[in-house]
Amino acid sequence: MKRLTHLLLIAVMILTIVPIAASDAAAEKVFVKAGQVAELTAAKAPTLRIIDCRAAEDSYKKGHVPGAIYFNVDENLRVTGAWDTVGVRRQLEAQEELFGRQLGIGSDTMVVLYDDIEDNATRLFWELKYTGHEKVAIMFGGWPEWQAKKLPVEKNINQVAPALFVADVQPQLLATSSYIMSKMGDPNVVLLDARPPAQFKGDEKHAAAKIGGRLPSAVNAFTLVNWEHKTYLKDPAELEEMYADLAVTPDKEIIIYCNTGWYAANSYFILKALNFPNVRVYDYSWVEWNGKGHLPKIVGKAK
């Protein structure tokens, strides 16, 4: 009984394992160890929801973390919004229905996400945070870490009972085009472009974008360079130095964009792991911005 109580305490806290240099005590809890997840599953901890976010459901069927359910993030969260923008968040009622009915997440549910490349898991992480669900973390190292440690694997197709998910929207996590325009030229705000360099320069573009280019004054750090072997975060000191060179520092408000919100959500997760307090995601991103003629932009060669 004492052991289960201890494990539940771990789950409630969602312990961080990233050695944040600046302020460990205040750091947001965004990671949980694979070994801790294994202990929680073995103890059948109540109110725990483990979600497999890998791109292919076949991978889930071949083997997954015991008790995990499968969720196709790309299929279920990628919708079309205004200005033909793809990848945007669902409407609030649809989010509540999806997270509550399909994923069985209630107000007390402790959610652990894992992936094999992390950008799907981090997209779901941001959307859960945006809708006010605080008890969510990503398993450090993802599925590769679980396999490397030779932890138990099952092949059951798990189902969940519906739960009541009541969203408590956190507007401070979201940026819109009008909000960004209101912050243009503010020295305390940094626009961070999370796309590959060729898209930032405008030499290439996303298929849904009409033109290549970027937002004025934006700096570029492709989000996938934050990871080693796709699921292991690089040394935090190295990441902090990289971002500091771009003037992306914790004392600034950071607004992240990409093409459709996917890479931006990934960089949001990274900056929260590094204890950045004020980070927003522009989830409509360049695919919306480039289509609005009245918005300022630096146009590239890609058409």
Image: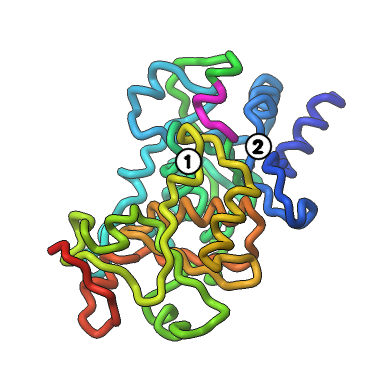
Q: Is residue 33 left or right of residue 258?
A: right
In the rendered view, would you say 254 is above or below 163? below
One can see residue 100 in this view:
no
* 1 or 2: tag closer to the N-terminus: 2
The residue singled out by tag 2 in the image is 32
Q: Residue at x 12, y 64 (%)?
A: 303
246 or 127, nearer to the observer: 246
Image location (x, y in percent) of residue 249: 61, 66
Which residue is painted at 44% across and 31% down in the image? 116
Question: In the image, what residue type sits under mark 1?
Answer: Leu
Marks 1,2: beta carbons within 8 A = no
Give the image location of residue 65, x and y in percent.
53, 23
Task: Relative to 42, say whether 162 is above or below.
Answer: below
Q: Nearer the viewer, residue 69 or 275?
A: 275
Mark 1 residue crowding within 10 angstroms, few (<14) / some (14–19) / many (20+): many
Taking the spot 56% from the left edge, 25% from the top edge, the residue there is: 145
Question: Is residue 144 shown in magenta?
Answer: yes
For this orientation, the residue located farthest to the left is 303
The stretch in magenta equals 140-146
